[in-house]
Image: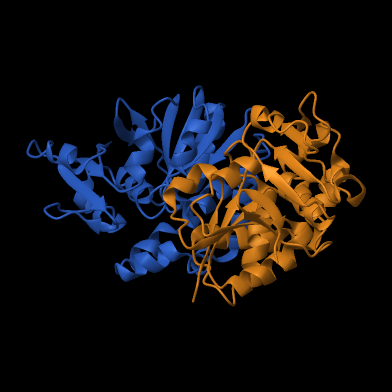
Chain colours: A blue, B orange
Amino acid sequence: MKHIEVCLTPALLPLYDLKGSVVVVIDIFRATSSISYGIDNGADAIIPVASVEECLSYQGNGYLLGAERNGEVVNGFDFGNSPFSYTRELVEGKTLVLTTTNGTHAINVSKNADEIVIGSFLNLSAVCEYLVKQNKNIFLLCSGWKNKVNLEDTLFAGAVVNKLKDKFDALCDSSVLAEDLYLAAQSDLHEYMKKTSHSERLKKLGIEKDIAFCLNVDLIHSVPVIKEGKIVKSE
Amino acid sequence: MKHIEVCLTPALLPLYDLKGSVVVVIDIFRATSSISYGIDNGADAIIPVASVEECLSYQGNGYLLGAERNGEVVNGFDFGNSPFSYTRELVEGKTLVLTTTNGTHAINVSKNADEIVIGSFLNLSAVCEYLVKQNKNIFLLCSGWKNKVNLEDTLFAGAVVNKLKDKFDALCDSSVLAEDLYLAAQSDLHEYMKKTSHSERLKKLGIEKDIAFCLNVDLIHSVPVIKEGKIVKSE
């Protein structure tokens, strides 16, 4: 039986071996939610880059450029990682280039994996079905907040463990922890998330609507995956 | 109001500033449980050292030498970190020198703190009362297992958060996570711990009695603290 492991922050990644695994990158507030939404809304591709400078180097040539740092749109960019910047109207048929505080970092450090999938509550069931089909070991990588553990990414990892634990071994302590946290929170994710300091901080940024949106379960059915450095819709 | 922070593994310590804080080092299975039990049973002091070699350098001079690696007593040493090696009969009036896989490492990396306290379920309430008296920021450091997050240390951190959250701010996501895990487990810690791979591994080592013992809440009332590099009973 293949197994599931949960890594609660990218800072712990050196302790694990990703070879042969499918990595699910998780940054619920908001990068991987927005990326999933954008791909579902018909974006051709989203190119994740590490730095604002790298993002700027794509200027011209018809790309849409997004950059977020510390929860805010970087000066001079049109959008950051609010899901409402990833509607069909705005992204259909376009290629986006995106750098974010945590999410694109997590993608960049996962390069040893067999495959990288983008996960969010918006496409929870679709991601789980995709993982079952791949039949490889699963590695759930929470982006966290500046390398610290956060609740929302842990909750999502727990949701995946909960859905897949009959088909995969999920015995690592972080998997147990994540699932039990999800079980405590699942009846009202939005209410539960009020506990977190991260949510408090996001509230100060005036993005409560984004938070509520990112906690919608199974709103969409696309599974974004990385092919040749670009995030595209899985086949 | 002073605050509580939880650090789920020593690997995340570089993200935090310990200055001015009281650090509680947590290694439930079994180092900090056994240390607390030994101090309560009248050991004069326990000297935590990083390596087996350093431990050996204390040989002679009346010290008791303990060394544990990967859950087993190191060859040539009289004891490791089983609490049953720390009874009054064995340790009263003695000074012990101890090196363990995870717990003594966590002590050694906490040296920037104002003060270091040794915590376990055995002395949970005593530790909490001590922390209230100190009236400093609290930093709960889980030793984990080889830098990975483990359930038992997280549960203990959650128990402390649960007891102290009316007197301290406990807003970091790891505190919320640890407390909620504890609330899910508290009605039967022993049953809950059967979930963990770590417990499974410890079972293979034939130390189920140790595990059961380390989950006794408030068996003792001593609070071990570090003074001049030695663990002694707090005044």
Q: Nearer the viewer, residue B34 or A175?
A: B34
Does B69 sit left or right of A215 as displayed? right
Q: How many marks?
A: 0
Which residue shows up at 74% across the image and 50% down it? B45
Q: Residue furthest left?
A: A60
Which residue shows up at 69% across the image and 37% down it? B100
Please say if A13 is above or below B220.
above
Quadrant of the image occupied by residue A59: top left
Q: Nearer the viewer, residue B161 or A39?
A: B161
Residue B180 visible in the shown view: no
Q: Residue furthest right?
A: B89
Quarter of the figure with the C terminus of chain B: bottom right
Q: Position of residue A120 (x, y in %)?
A: 44, 48
Which residue shows up at 68% across the image and 47% down it? B27
Residue B204 visible in the shown view: yes
Quadrant of the image occupied by residue B156: bottom right
Q: Nearer the viewer, residue B78 or B215?
A: B78
Q: Position of residue A199 (x, y in %)?
A: 42, 65
Q: Position of residue A41 (x, y in %)?
A: 30, 47
Please say if A142 is above or below B205.
below
Q: Position of residue A198 (x, y in %)?
A: 41, 62
Does A215 sit left or right of A81 as displayed? right
